[in-house]
Image (cartoon, rainbow, N blue to C red):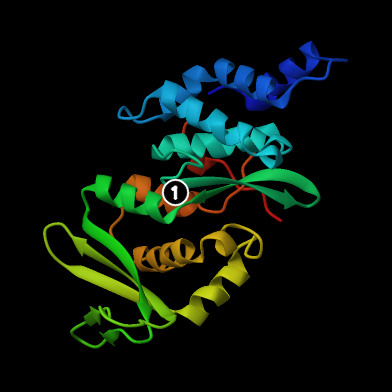
Amino acid sequence: MSNLKNVLKNQEDKGQGITVNPTYAMKQLMIKMKNDIDLALPKNLSSERFQKVSMSAFNNNEKLQNCEPTTFIAAMMQSAQLGLEPNTPLGQVYLIPHNLNGVDKVQFQVGYKGLLQLAHRSGKLKTLYAHEVKENDEFEIDYGLEQKLIHKPLLKGNRGDVIGYYAVYHLEPSGYSFEFMTYDEVAKHGKKYSKDFEGGIWEKDFDSMAKKTVIKKLLKYAPLSIEMQKAVAFDESVKSSIDSDMLLVESIGE
């Protein structure tokens, strides 16, 4: 694959003494990297559409434009290798500006719906889903020798506040498992592990992030496709270089 830092350096050398518009610079960078992007994408996803969606994500967020370009491209390539579109209403993948040791970089986050999409594609999981449980719902859970989960949402009247979340997978051709976390457990997890719990995506869409959290906990014990393994490994990472397999690129630490 292209040496990303060399490509950027060549652009900087050509533009010495000239103020370059970030959008123009990123568009030119994507043109230079078209072959790398094409190779990373699955056949079912158009390279032209993916680049257009990625540029839209970049153009619509000034904070992303202020991040190190290498980290935006690396996060974009992680999206490409998973075949998921970044920063769209589909909620598959999020490219999030994040200050790391005083420098703005782009963090990759897989969305709740991105995990569902990958599970659907995998062929290993027949179904994967998550739901919130509210205090007035009928809910019963048993982790004994014969696992059992019963959830009957209250259909009339006030369901009350959310008290927890659960995720379930069914295997192909048979078998299943589930995981449950209380609301407080999810919030504690988010505060501990998310760099932008306050003011970030957790605050904007706690419900989706909570479902993603319980799904990821469940998937630790599930037979996963390569794509699903990558999604779990990529989640909440910051990288500054690219490879034909982004799993081989180390994440930048705090």
Name above or below for residue 21 compared with residue 245: above
Q: Residue drawn 45% across and 53% down? A: 111
Furthest residue to the front? 157
Amino acid at circle 1: Gly
Name above or below for residue 86 compared with residue 18: below
Residue position marked by numbered label 1 in the rendering:
91
Nearer to me, 144 or 114: 114
Q: Is residue 202 left or right of residue 240?
A: left
Give x and y (percent) for residue 159. Answer: 35, 81
Nearer to me, 240 or 65: 65
Q: Residue drawn 33% across and 53% down? A: 116
Give x and y (percent) for residue 105. Answer: 69, 43
Under circle 1, the secondary element is loop
Q: Is residue 150 visible?
A: yes
Q: Residue drawn 49% across and 43% down? A: 247
Q: Is residue 165 left or right of residue 16?
A: left
Q: Is residue 241 visible?
A: no
Nearer to me, 182 or 133: 133
Q: Is residue 112 left or right of residue 56?
A: left
Furthest residue to the right? 17
Q: Residue drawn 24% across and 88% down? A: 144
Count of picture labels: 1
